[in-house]
Amino acid sequence: MFLRLIFLFLLFYLVLLVVRFFQSLGQSPPANRRPPDPLPRKAMVKDEVCNTYIPEDEALKENKNGRVYYFCSEDCRKKFLESRENR
Ligand SMILES: [Zn+2]
């Protein structure tokens, strides 16, 4: 009688394991479900004066002869304008 109780308990435990196994198959863990965040892709623009690249939204802009020039700082913008005037 007591042995049969243990047997029933083991059987119940096995069913529980099988159910859990199928549940884990149905739903992947939350860590793997989310795709990795894509890297923020900012448009990089070139500073014509010091030849460095800066993100477009941080760059200073100057429109000359229908072309937009980008600068990393006010100094570079001034240098560019001065060199343009001397030409
Ligand atoms: Zn610069």
Image (cartoon, rainbow, N blue to C red):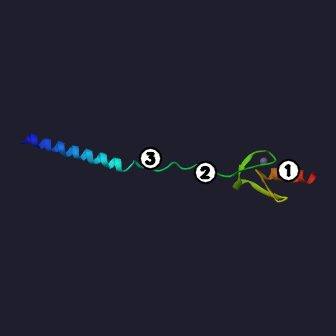
| Residue 67 located left or right of residue 18 | right
| Residue 72 located left or right of residue 84 | left
**Secondary structure beneath label 1:** helix
Q: What residue sits 71% from the left and 54% below the top? A: 56
Image coords of residue 32 (percent x, y)? 44, 47
Image coords of residue 69 (percent x, y)? 79, 54
Image coords of residue 24 (percent x, y)? 34, 47
In this view, the residue in front, 19 or 49, is 19
Three-letter amino acid code of the residue under disc 2:
Pro
Label 1 near label 2: C-beta < 8 Å?
A: no
State the mark number for residue 40: 2
Q: Which residue is mark 1?
A: 79
Quick one: which residue is furthest to the left in this view?
1
Count every numbered label the image shows and give the total: 3
**Alpha carbon separation for disc pair 3 and 1:** 51 Å
Three-letter amino acid code of the residue under disc 1:
Lys
Q: What residue sits 80% from the left and 45% below the top? A: 50
**Secondary structure beneath label 2:** loop
Image quadrant holding the N terminus, namely: top left
**Sequence-first disc among 2 and 1:** 2
Q: What residue sits 14% from the left and 41% below the top? A: 7
**Alpha carbon separation for disc pair 2 and 1:** 31 Å
| Residue 87 located left or right of residue 15 | right
**Secondary structure beneath label 3:** helix
**Alpha carbon separation for disc pair 2 and 3:** 21 Å
Q: Which residue is mark 3?
A: 32
**Sequence-first disc among 3 and 1:** 3
Three-letter amino acid code of the residue under disc 3:
Asn
**Sequence-first disc among 2 and 3:** 3
Image coords of residue 77 (percent x, y)? 82, 53
